Image: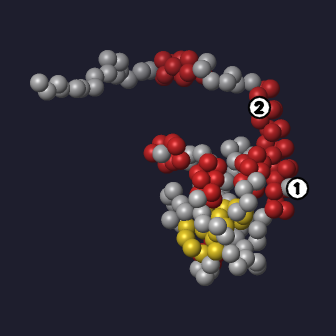
Amino acid sequence: FAKKITTVFTDNNIYPLKKRLLGILKKQNSYEKISIKNLVLRKIYYYYSKFIKNVYINSKYHHVQNNIQSDQFVIYPLHVTPEASILGSDPELADQFCLIKNIALNLPYGVTLYVKEHPDQLYGYDINHNFYNKLLSINNIRLIHKNENVYKIIEHKNCLGVAVLNGTLG
């Protein structure tokens, strides 16, 4: 016996603007309330993260073009966070820290993972100073500034490969 499965929407009408707006307002009740307090706290955290990055994280960048170590390396370009293509198709890969950590821990001894920032990433909201602090806690990871020319780094004789999910570099 073969069963036929169909998807029938009982409520597939086109709603007037007023009803659509009421639906949006109902959904807002399931999220964090819009308030001045939350807006101010998010802005404070944004500027705090930016300050920490400028003071602490920027001093930890590895300037590859001027100083490529004799170690062999693999390069991982960060993706803009959040990225719809990752969240929609592979949500388990959306956590870039876990992905980078797994790559770094599975590299052979003596191989370094260079993590390059995405040039269009807005710092402070999705990728913040905690993300970079966790990355820097792993011994074989080096941060590369977003202005470094990644194509010259890939051409280096010690570059073993590129680890990517998607994107231009891949």
Q: Is residue 134 above or below residue 17?
A: below
Residue designated by label 1: 55
**Residue placed farthest to the left in the image?**
1
Which mark is on residue 39?
2
Q: Quadrant of residue 76?
A: bottom right
Q: Tell me: 52 left or right of 110.
A: right
The answer to whether residue 94 is above or below residue 62 is above
Residue 70 versus residue 84: which sits nearer the camera? Answer: 70
Q: Work out whether mark 2 precedes mark 1 in sequence or the reverse, and give the earlier one.
A: 2
Residue 137 picture location, percent across and down: 76, 53
User: Mark 1 is on which residue type?
Assistant: Val
> Is any part of residue 108 visible from this angle?
yes
Q: Residue at x 56, y 17 (%)?
A: 26
Quarter of the image with the N terminus in it: top left
Q: What element does badge 2 sit on?
A: helix
**The furthest residue to the right:** 55
- Tell me how the rendering is colored: secondary structure
Number of disc labels? 2
Give amino acid for label 2: Leu
Classify 26 as above or below 50.
above
Tell which of 7 and 114 is nearer to you. 114
